[in-house]
Amino acid sequence: MPKQRIALLISYDGTDFCGWQIQKGRPEVSVQGALEKALSEICGEKIGVTGSGRTDSGVHATGQVAHGDVKSTIPAPKYREALNSLLPGSIRILKARAVPDSFHARFDAVRRDYAYYISSGAVPPAHRRNYCHYVRRRYDLSELNRIVSILPGIWDFTTFSAAGDQSKSRVREIFSASFHREGDQLAFRIGGNAFLWRMVRSLTGTVLHIAEQGGGPEELARRLEARDRNEAGPTAPSRGLFLEKVSYGPEYGFF
Amino acid sequence: MPKQRIALLISYDGTDFCGWQIQKGRPEVSVQGALEKALSEICGEKIGVTGSGRTDSGVHATGQVAHGDVKSTIPAPKYREALNSLLPGSIRILKARAVPDSFHARFDAVRRDYAYYISSGAVPPAHRRNYCHYVRRRYDLSELNRIVSILPGIWDFTTFSAAGDQSKSRVREIFSASFHREGDQLAFRIGGNAFLWRMVRSLTGTVLHIAEQGGGPEELARRLEARDRNEAGPTAPSRGLFLEKVSYGPEYGFF
């Protein structure tokens, strides 16, 4: 079968999935597994997809990107509708486009943007229970922004790595990090070249912890410079995290 | 058992319920049914609750109010935690408080506020699929606000009543009606003394329809004045609708 490489822009509700990646011994469905199943059905043979990176169980995406090599007799943009008709409502293909065979969703990504949502109040609103971290305390927006103002730049993120992290290097570059008020929620938006496993959740939990303790940006810098996992605060729950955007070089010029 | 009347401020995700009200022959659980079951378990006898009004299947609430007569040996505010520990996560009690025996959640309500959420774009984000109406078209905010600017006041809402509506009078007073941009969504907020069954959804669908057809406020007024259900446009789907707030007179002074 003649093949073409397509890239998919994907939104998913991570609540009912074991995460992006197919995992042995996990009976729940993965987003990747559901996508491969639908693509294989369309193409009549087993098709694999490669994502820009993993997301954990419960983590959502509004802009995950993946590539796969599919039947070239179907125009690339048609894969959007074809996939959406087969996929559960919890996975939506926002866009499908043809890309050069050299395109790689993970290795060619130059920037990832995440958002972490926080609701304050004694009890979370029911319809947001799977989409935010709810905390009793109310935070001061300018204080949170003062703490994260030190993040842009190149850091060794060992402090915010997870047990079992096998990355060769834990040095990552952060391009931007700031808190915003969105309706009655806070959103922590962070963009960087790449992130370690669970790094955004560990960093978010630690920033909130520092704010609660009355610490400032120097306390976050101290913990980062310690390069010691014991200096991380609590890891914020996965339900508040959204992979919002993955960016590629101008030679790919999308999405 | 000595009794006290309590009022509950309730948030629910309407997705998996047949609506607020217990309905014969509907196997799905109603919000009212789930609440009565939990309250009865706490009190050791059958307890009924009365809501400020019904919401349909799929309609959500961030501020429904209900009352019930419960065991007075438990301080009223304690019912919040006790109920939340028994209820599914899709129903959350935000507040519980003692009210005079004369308080009635429905008859004493002087104002109801609803919000209807609309997402524009070819495909809805997966995590919002149950919480908004998604439409391909993008609307002009000021044009929508121009159309609904005629709503505040007293109108006969027969045009926006549902088949089978048994209300004695279809005259209702609207206090405010306006569209707002909230992140990448539009929210239509409307407050009035009371609403007919499905009135907000019918009105919302008609306003969007008028905007699409290039009609203005005079077209909405014409349809209202016709007092004819055939003049209503499509009914907007229940998943976009939230009962946000129910207000009571100053003698009750909450929530």
Image (cartoon, coloured by chain):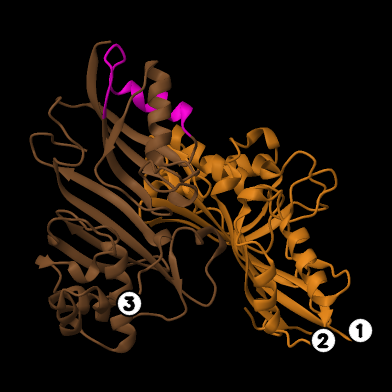
Chain colours: A orange, B brown
Whether pointer 1 and pointer 2 mark residues with C-beta atoms closer than 8 Å, the reply is yes
- Counting from the top left corner in percent of width and height, residue B220 is at 20, 79
Q: Per the image, is B242 magenta?
A: no
The residue shown at (42%, 28%) is B37
Is residue B199 something that shows in the picture?
A: yes
Q: Secondary structure at mark 3?
A: helix
Q: Type of residue at label 3?
A: Leu
Is residue A118 something that shows in the picture?
A: no
* Chain where mark 2 sits: A
Q: Quadrant of residue A83?
A: bottom right
Dot 1, crowdedness within 10 Å: few (<14), some or many (≥20)?
Answer: few
Which quadrant of the rendered structure holds the N terminus of chain B?
top left
Q: Type of residue at label 1?
A: Met
In the picture of the structure, the residue carrying the numbered disc 3 is B208
- Residue sitting at the far right: A1
Question: In the image shown, does A135 or B22 lie closer to the viewer?
Answer: B22
Which quadrant of the rendered structure holds the C terminus of chain B?
top left
In the picture of the structure, the residue carrying the numbered disc 1 is A1
Q: Quick one: label 1 or label 2, which is nearer the N terminus?
A: 1
In the picture of the structure, the residue carrying the numbered disc 2 is A72
What is the spatial separation of the Cα atoms under label 1 and label 2, in whole angstroms?
8 Å
